Image: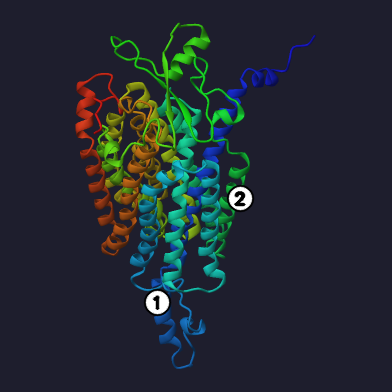
Amino acid sequence: MARLPAGIRFIVSFSRDQWYRAFIFILTFLLYASFHLSRKPISIVKGELHKYCAAWDEAEVRFSSQSSKAGYVTPHQLLDNKTDCGWAPFDKDNYQQLLGALDYSFLCAYAIGMYLSGIIGERLPIRYYLSFGMLASGAFTALFGLGYFYDIHSLGFYVVTQVINGLVQTTGWPSVVTCLGNWFGKGRRGLIMGVWNSHTSVGNILGSLIAGYWVSTCWGLSFVVPGAIVAAMGIVCFLFLIEHPKDVRCSSTLSTHSKGYENGTNRFRLQKQILNSEKNRPLDPEMQCLLLSDGKGSIHPNHVVIVRGDSGGGTAAISFTGALKIPGVIEFSLCLLFAKLVSYTFLFWLPLYITNVDHLDAKKAGELSTLFDVGGIFGGILAGVISDRLEKRASTCGLMLLLAAPTLYAFSAISKMGLEATVAMLLLSGALVSGPYALITTAVSADLGTHKSLKGNAHALSTVTAIIDGTGSVGAALGPLLAGLISPSGWSNVFYMLMFADACALLFLIRLIHKELSCPGSAAGDQVPFKEQ
């Protein structure tokens, strides 16, 4: 009898549980990538909402002087009341402030909503909550683009649309992180989440390409098409998202040793007790399971079952102040505030900067700006791998932030030397800026949310994630706003602001870095436990 084909042997070499995990990994990746896909068009369209008019003005002066005797009209007069400088009301001299107001409206609403989203999402089915958020986000993203087709020139319309869109998009992050946490354990967390977190850059790249395709011809479609994609992914989420392994009778990461059961109101969470205290670096649960499955080790961890109920019994939800007492939460939250300030300033203003400096049209500038996100993919994965190997999250973030400061200083000067220099600086800056941002929002948040002193508190991960990412979103709101206020005085001043923010992010990590270096083997979430009153 002939052997099975190599491809079939490869397929059957994976268990049913592994295939489900791979499916959830890919699905949550695509779902959150679609959120970022819908955030990117505004940065691409900025170059079309306000166009550089100096060339028109010079041509008009020459045209007027040569044809005034002949009674000709100027190009502006031929266009009736419309202007060559873009789309009203963004065609005025204060267009940076108006465009910055759009960014601030979205990001401020996102920051406020993030603190509430984790609490709301914890009490609703993830699939319903995330599907609703994606459908609503798709609708309001498309609504912004409809302003083009219905010739809407009210600043209030675009601001309100951005505010509501920012609020509904907060449903995404807590949902996908919780779902992924249900399916994956702690082993190789930095690498797994580093790869998974590249959805941010993939979404930004796709959003730039899609928006750039229509930006010069019909910028309304630059929003309508991404909005339709997000809404379509919301339907996919409703039809295919599996919240927990038990929903399809799959084993959790630890269930090869102990089983848990979950009904509608109570969840049985498996929590590994601390192993022998004499071991300096005990293995995480997922690695123990891998050793057992390979037959190379014999570890018999003892598990306890923690019951969380809505009726008041079991483990109570951790308080906001209790979550702040977890060692490292405040430091990483403030670090992320400044790191996200830098990242989102690039996200929302980079295409316009490239348009002004390299004198490219909006489409080409949008396509070129995707290189920053390409660098971000490698930066996030590299940060995860290094932090896993060294088991030092803060030190990894600190090193990348330290290298990012001189890179940002050089960016404004080197990027003016030509297209090749711009490409190189975009890749390098993207890796160094996005690496710490990606590590803190994923692996670090998960480490702190599963701190050993929490003793299996099921609410902790959601609360800690909301605190860290919510604080970071405050910086994400401030960055584009400050860029809009500072850019009229020169783009070099914007880069000085980014360098200062990078230095502040590094400053808040110094204490944690000192602890890591003085205590070998320590990492985020491994510091001295606290006792909540």
The foreground one among 64 and 144 is 144
* Residue at the spot 58% in from the left edge and 38% down from the top edge: 241
* Residue at the spot 78% in from the left edge and 11% down from the top edge: 2
Which mark identifies residue 57? 1
Which element carries disc 1, helix, strand or loop? helix
**What x and y, as percent, mark residue 51?**
43, 68
Q: State how the image is colored.
A: rainbow
The foreground one among 117 and 420 is 117
Question: Does 146 sit left or right of 157 as displayed?
Answer: right
* Residue type indicated by callout 1: Asp
Mark 2 packing: few (<14 Cα in 10 Å), some, or many (20+)?
A: some
Distance Cα–Cα, label 2 vs label 1 = 44 Å
The foreground one among 5 and 129 is 129
Q: Answer above or below: position of 70 versus 329.
A: below
Which mark identifies residue 357? none
Question: Does 331 sit left or right of 42 as displayed?
Answer: left
Which element carries disc 2, helix, strand or loop? helix
* Residue at the spot 37% in from the left edge and 17% down from the top edge: 273
Question: Counting residues from the N terminus, which is met first, the one under dot 2 or under dot 1?
Answer: 1
Mark 1 packing: few (<14 Cα in 10 Å), some, or many (20+)?
A: some
**What x and y, as percent, mark residue 178?**
46, 36
Q: Answer above or below: position of 261 versus 198.
A: above
**What x and y, as percent, mark residue 412?**
30, 51
In which quadrant of the rendered view does residue 385 lie?
A: top left
**What x and y, as percent, mark residue 41?**
48, 56
* Residue type indicated by callout 2: Ala
The foreground one among 171 and 247 is 247
In this view of the protein, can residue 198 be seen by the observer? no
Q: Answer above or below: position of 459 versus 501.
A: above
- Disc number lying in front (2 or 1): 2
Residue that mark 2 sits on: 232
Q: Quadrant of the C terminus?
A: top left
